[in-house]
Amino acid sequence: MHLILKGDDRKPARGSWYLHGEPPLAVICIRCSFCGKPSTLRHMNGSGHQIAADGAVNPSVVCPHSGCNFHEWCRLEGWTGSELPPAE
Ligand SMILES: [Zn+2]
C-alpha cells in the first residue's frame, strides 16, 4: 500500500509533490505529510530513488527533518515519467 502524494506545483500542501526548478535541472520535492517540511527526492540512476511509470517511489521515503518519523512507501499521483529524466 502506497501513500499517495498529490501533484501540486503551485501551492504544495502537506503530502504533495512538486518539481522545483526547470527541467532537466529540476528536482522532485515532496512536502512531508507529518511535519509539513519540504525535502528532495534523490532521483538518480543506480542510486537514490527510482520513480516507476505509475509514480511509485522506490525505495521508501524517509523524512530527513529531525524529530519527524515519516517513513512511507509513496506514489506520485499524476506522474507520467516525462517530467524529469533521471540524473546520471
Ligand atoms: Zn517530516
Image (cartoon, rainbow, N blue to C red):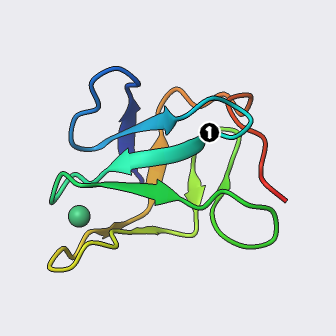
Q: Quadrant of the N terminus?
A: bottom left
- Would residue 66 be found to the left or right of residue 29 on screen? left
* Label 1 secondary element: loop
Question: Callout 1, which amino acid?
Answer: Ala
Q: In which image quadrant can residue 4 be found?
A: top left
Q: Identify the residue at horizontal 69%, vertical 31% (top origin).
A: 23
What residue sits 59% from the left and 61% below the top? 42
Residue 82: percent from left, percent from top: 74, 28
Q: In which quadrant is the C terminus drawn?
A: bottom right
Dot 1 corresponds to which residue?
Answer: 26
Q: Is mark 1 within 8 Å of ligand 1?
A: no
In the image, residue 71 lies at what x, y percent?
33, 71
Q: Residues within 10 Å of mark 1 (few under 14, many from 20)?
A: some
Q: Horizontal and vertical percent for residue 32?
A: 27, 54
Q: Nearer the viewer, residue 38 or 3?
A: 38
| Front residue of this view, candidates 84 and 1 | 84
